[in-house]
Amino acid sequence: MTGSEVSPSFRLAYVPGVTPTKWVRIWNERLPDVPLTLVQVSAAEACDVLRSGGADAGFLRLPVDGTDLSAIPLYTETTVVVIPKDHVVTAVDEVSAADLADDIVLHPLDDTLEWERRPGLPALERPATTEDAIELVAAGVGLLVVPQSLARLYHRKDLTYRTVADAPESRVALSWPQDATTDLVEDFIGIVRGRTVNSSRGRRPAPAPAQSKPKRSDTGDTRRKSSSTAGKSAGKSVGKSPRSGSGGSGGSGGAKGGRRGKPRRRS
């Protein structure tokens, strides 16, 4: 291998709460010669990692900062409020933002939920990360509204969560730099979008096996010819009577050729 030949590889960033396992498995099945490396990043730094070349593509939460990154929305997450297990909200299955009006609701710096008006009372300081905010909820400092995947990721035995019906929802997207849409990025886009290996839109469709042109079976022609010959023979047999020596024609000829004389009158 020369110095200019570099083995291909693919780096995939993902933010907390996203589970890329399914897509990584498909990648390994389809491109076993191209290793995929996972790069875990915080929600706040995800866009900068893509811009700096720290990853070829990444799963992040919308909105994407700037116009130099392409993004394909994948799915929308339910929004929940994380609460201590002895909180009054645990008595119901679902709450509204108004139900949290009297509680301190933490607002971490890596929060991606877009509120027109945030619920609850603001805390004196903003936690640096969602994980830090979870610790504050466990300490009884306040509540936290997050995508459900984050509530599951940072699950604690002393905490639980409930759905917030009228809260904004978080959307997860696949993103990559527009000016770095490589062939490997196209391959991964195809996997995420559910394209099959043989899809016409895929970059690397599996070659179809060469197939020789099927030969016409002679059996059908032979049967048709045999049937046609048999029909003609049957027609000849019906239209013309076969000649035989002493059978029909001999008897018939004798009847025509011989004359019977009139009986002689006896005297």
Image (spheres, helix red, strand yellow):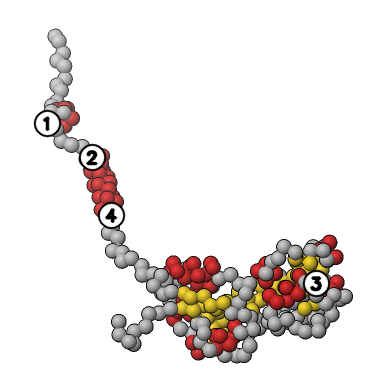
Residue carrying label 4? 217
* Residues at marks 3 and 4, CA–CA distance in whole angstroms: 83 Å
Provide the secondary structure element on which disc 4 rests.
loop
Q: Residue at x 29, y 51 (%)?
A: 220
Helix, strand or loop status at disc 2: helix
Q: Name which of mark 2 and mark 3 comes first in the sequence.
A: 3
* Apparent side of residue 86 relative to residue 148 in the rendered image (left or right): right
Calculate the distance from the C-alpha at mark 4 to the C-alpha at mark 1: 46 Å
Label disc, if present, on residue 237 of the rendered structure: 2
Does residue 11 appear in the picture of this structure? yes
Which quadrant does the N terminus fall into? bottom left
Check residue 245 in the rendering and tell me which mark sits there, or answer none.
1
> Which quadrant of the structure image shows residue 208?
bottom left
Mark 2, other Cα within 10 Å: few <14 / some 14–19 / many ≥20: few
The local crowd at label 1, few if under 14, some if 14 to 19, many if 20 or more residues have their Cα within 10 Å, is few
Chain-order first, disc 4 or disc 2: 4
Which of marks 2 and 1 precedes in the sequence?
Answer: 2
Q: Amino acid at mark 2?
A: Ser
Mark in the foreground, 3 or 4: 3
Would residue 216 be found to the left or right of residue 157 on screen?
Answer: left
Task: Kindly report the distance in space between the C-alpha atoms of the residues bearing marks 4 and 2.
Answer: 31 Å
What amino acid does circle 3 point to? Answer: Gly
Residue at label 3? 140
Task: Determine the residue positioned at 26% across, 39% down.
Answer: 238
- Eye-nearest disc, 4 or 1: 4
Q: Are marks 1 and 2 in contact (CB under 8 Å)?
A: no
Report if the CB atoms under discs 3 and 4 are less than 8 Å apart: no
State if disc 1 and disc 4 touch (CB < 8 Å): no
Q: What percent of the width, then of the height, locates residue 20?
A: 55, 71
- Residue drawn 81% across the image and 81% down it: 123
Mark 4: amino acid: Ser
The CA span between labels 2 and 3 is: 109 Å
